[in-house]
Image (cartoon, rainbow, N blue to C red):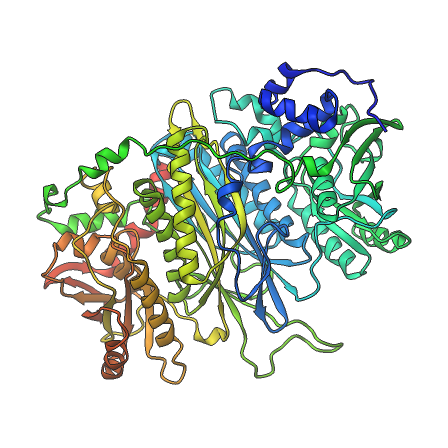
Amino acid sequence: MHTSTTESFPGLEAAEKLGLSPEEYGKIKEYLGREPNYTELSIFSVMWSEHCSYKNSIKWLKTLPKEGKRILAKAGEENAGLVDIGDGLACAFKIESHNHPSAIEPYQGAATGVGGIHRDIFTMGARPIASLNSLRFGDIELAKTKWLLRGIVKGIGDYGNAFGIPTVGGEVYFDESYNHNPLVNAMSIGIVENGKTISATSYGEGNPVYIVGSSTGKDGIHGATFASEDISENSADKLPSVQVGDPFQEKLLLEASLEAIETGHVIGMQDMGAAGIICSTSEMSAKGEHGMKIKLDAVPLRNTQMEPFEILLSESQERMLIVIEKGKEADVEAVFEKWDLNCVLIGEVIKEQKLYFYLDEKVIAEVEPETLVLGGKAPVYERESKEPKYLDEIKQYNIDKVEIPHDLKVIAQLLTVNPIIASKKWITEQYDSMVQTNNTSTNEPSDAAIIRIKPPRRKPGDNGTYAGKKQIALAVTTDCNANYVYADPEKGTAIAVAEAARNIVCSGGEPLAITNCLNFGNPYNKEVYWQFVGAIKGMSKACRKFGTPVTGGNVSFYNQSSDNGPVMPSPVIGMIGILDDVRLKMTLDFKSVGNLIYLLGESKNDISCSQYLMRYHKIKYSPAPHFDLDAEHTLHKTLLGLIRKEESRLIRSAHDLSEGGLFIALLESAMHRHLGFKISSNNKIRKDAYLFGEAQGRVIISIDVSDQEIFESEIKNSGVVSELIGEVTAGSLMIDEEDYGDIAEWIEPYENALESLLKE
């Protein structure tokens, strides 16, 4: 069968306008055995874009550790990672970016990012139960940054709240490198019973192929290509590439999809995200080693004046492609009719491993799915790399040339209102963290979000209660300090993994696995590619150490602009951990006056890459902070063992040291119950380094004074450095007998700093 010649064969010039290289155009002709027509050229342009093919990253991604004792689906096998969490349940989770759309249209860009990542979860048969995010913005004083921030936060909040999934955690950073290119990374977590997942596959000759959900429009066309190029002054012209989301329609699609899966008649299902119909048909067919015949004129359209390539490439939201067992069509159609959603037969599975797309009974495109997909015959490259020139300036850094300020209280006040450190209450109050059911634990602060997991109903009449059994919970977090990665990509990314694991452990959880969102500049920039390769190496090393395999994620290149250059390398880590008993969760807040405060982990004479160094001393170039992977691992094992001493409840609070160092960690631990602290500094190191340095592998814990002997006995032979630094007070803050005032004086500026900056 040959493609209809009713379409023209536009040639190399058109291919290059669509982002394909001359070499890639030659490869397309080789695969087809002829010249491609425009529809076929459009198909290859999106499927071979960086966003879909990972052609510049897949070689290195394959080096990441993927094996783990609880892994049920390895990276690349399904739409999201899948791990066993016990009690017959599995957790599906993934993080992805929606950076470019959010830079142009922040509200819809962020909203559809949330919708898309949730579809990746429920297309596997898992019910989403929580979401997180990681956001990066430019200079907070710029009007554009404020506009982007308001739009993105509202988009995330409106979509998540309406869809009915709680937003339980995340992070927000500000740096001028993100002025024109904000980063919007969305993470979704879902739960499914073991054995009840559905795969993104297609097989069985004659099985019908349906499109379900919303109708197809012109929004999102060439969105994948748009995401695979730099942001420029002309990017606003690509506004049609930004999809439009409808959370209420997605809620209907969620319920209908899960109910359809329950019929047992669904062979495979895939979300129509990037590249729309062509992506779903090709990936499902390649995985199932079959083909499809698809009638494009059967696709329900919102706009009847659509070209074939537009129908194939549209990224209209809230759509799925499903393959149904032949003869069972009526059962599945009835489900979608009940939910008032499209469920339209558009084709059938064929044995031949080819995709045929028809219009008016004529074949207008004919391709082999294997030539299009990641892991198939799509191109794979390794770009040139070189060490960035700015590292020369980092090597010139000398702590001895940095003067210690006379008044450290002023530094503490400055850091407290730093938008990176200060409360994100203005943002988080726009997200509903308690919607759905009372599964989330947000009233008591912890380093990671805690989500209680309800047991599955085992039989009629079973209400899903544990009846005395321990209730499991998940601890989830997103982490990355891009300043550390910029200074040293390998070390900085290892720190991102370590901090995520530390947050899980400080919350009482055992780290299980990660998903990642790798945000970098243009891969053809040799210095950017050097950062990317270093980040992969650091992630691999840390994940192997902590036993947290990589279950998948997203690579987002081309985050740079002609005006601003590349964004700081931002390999965001999304990590999940398990609590076998939710009662053993740990919070970060001090509990009682008189409790003793210990610092676990060794303090260092180190202010490198700290917010203190950058914000007060205005020193941009310094090495990544001290980090010892072995010591970090020992700390995690020891602390988790102490937290899980159920019979004694030895540890009263635990909080990791991150941005702002020891002082900010103490302040955050004190504020929740309006308590204070009295501490003495370590005279062996600089006082500014002791209070504000960001050396890694450190945690503050509090214990009851009556447990001091048993605690010190437990910690003595653990290999973890432990230092008694002070005690919890009724509200006063004292450092080396210097009065830092009352906690009430610090709470108001900390909680309102971001909102105040946005009003200026």
Q: Nearer the viewer, residue 584 or 24?
A: 24
User: Is 723 situated left or right of 72 in this image?
Assistant: left
Question: For the N terminus, which image quadrant?
Answer: top right
Q: Judge from the rendering whether residue 416 lies leftward or rightward of residue 15; answer left or right.
A: left
Residue closest to the eye, 420 or 226: 226
In the displayed structure, 455 sits above or below 281; it is below
In the orientation shown, which residue stands out farthest toward the right? 327
Where's the C terminus, which quadrant? top left
Q: Is residue 646 left or right of residue 732?
A: right
Counting every numbered tag in the picture gives: 0
Examine the rendered structure and indicate whether residue 199 appears above or below residue 369: below
**Residue 699 percent coordinates (x, y):** 29, 64
Apparent side of residue 526 relative to residue 311 in the rendered image (left or right) = left
Residue 391 position by quadrant: top left
Nearest the camera: 150 or 73?
A: 73
Q: Who's the residue at 28% across and 58% down the image?
A: 628
Viewer-proximal residue, 52 or 464?
Answer: 52
Instruction: Where is residue 208? Give x, y as percent.
Output: 85, 46
- What percent of the width, then of the height, locates residue 297? 84, 31
State whether residue 609 is above or below residue 92. above
- Residue 20 in view (yes/no): no
Residue 392 visible here: yes
Instruction: Residue 692 in the image: state x and y as whole percent.
Output: 21, 53
Q: Residue at x 57, y 81 (%)?
A: 469
